[in-house]
Amino acid sequence: MKRRRVLKSLTQAGMALSWPRCALPQQGTAQLPIPEWKLGERARFLPLTRLDGTQIDWTSYRLKVLILVFWASWCPFCARQNPLLDRLYRSQRDRGLAMVTISIDKTPELARQYVAKHAYEFEVGFATAPWQAVFRQRKGLPQLFVFDRAGVLRQIEVREMLDDDVEELSRYL
């Protein structure tokens, strides 16, 4: 709670951290605080490991529109939505669209097999316990979050998005 007050006072004083903020482990801390993403607010991102074992560098998305999606290989709604998202990503990445998806599968191997089978090009991370806690803040799957170029959360969708819905996401570019 004290940390929130300090960050809030820094933000009000114009000393906010640049987008996107990424929580980094501090010495002696066992667990990072779980971010609560709210519409109209800047986001804080937890460390995330890609399926290939490398770390996502959240600062590489600075000045890009970021779509973040929670999904699972066993989810029929995700199976219909992911190809639409991949198509959007392929067609709009040159305009500044970034997409990071987070698998909530039981093992990274299940997610790797699924992504390889479908040849998706968007980035894929695996949900660790802190990311699972972010996912559990809302009920439903898939979950999609749109962050503008300043790192402000602009849209939350907790449902399957159809073709027209996905294409409409390009309005943020």
Image: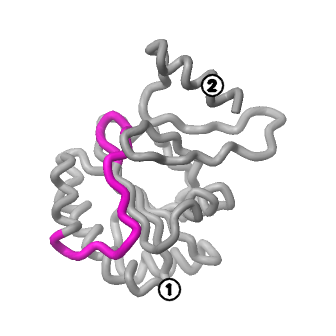
Residue type indicated by callout 2:
Arg
Q: What is the number of the mark on residue 164?
A: none
Residue 170 or residue 2, whichever sits in front: 2
In the image, residue 99 sits, relative to residue 15, either above or below, namely below
Query: In the image, 149: left or right of 112?
Result: left
- Residue 156 falls left or right of residue 166: right
> Dot 2, how many residues are within 10 Å of its Cα: few (below 14), some (14-19), or many (20+)?
few
The verdict on residue 108 being magenta is: no
Residue 5, label in figure: 2
Is residue 87 shown above or below 25? below
Q: How far apart are marks 1 and 2 (CA)?
A: 40 Å
Residue that numbered label 1 is attached to: 74
Q: In the image, what residue occupies the spot 22% across and 66% down?
A: 166
Q: Helix, strand or loop at disc 2?
A: helix
Instruction: Look at discs 1 and 2 and give the one toward the viewer.
Output: 2
What is the residue that sits farthest to the right in this orientation?
28
Tag 2 or tag 1, which sits nearer the N-term? 2
- Residue 67 shows up from this direction: no
Q: How many marks?
A: 2
Quarter holding the N terminus is top right
Residue 78, position in %: x, y?
Answer: 39, 78
The magenta-colored residue range is 147-164
| x then y, percent, for residue 105 | 58, 76
Q: Please report the residue visible at 49 percent of the width from the left and 63 percent of the height from the top.
A: 102
> Looking at the image, which is closer to me, 53 or 124?
124
**Which residue extends farthest top?**
13
Q: Is mark 1 on a helix, strand or loop?
A: loop
Name the quadrant containing residue 91: bottom left
Residue 73 x, y percent position in the rendering: 48, 81
Give the colour scheme of this rendering.
one colour
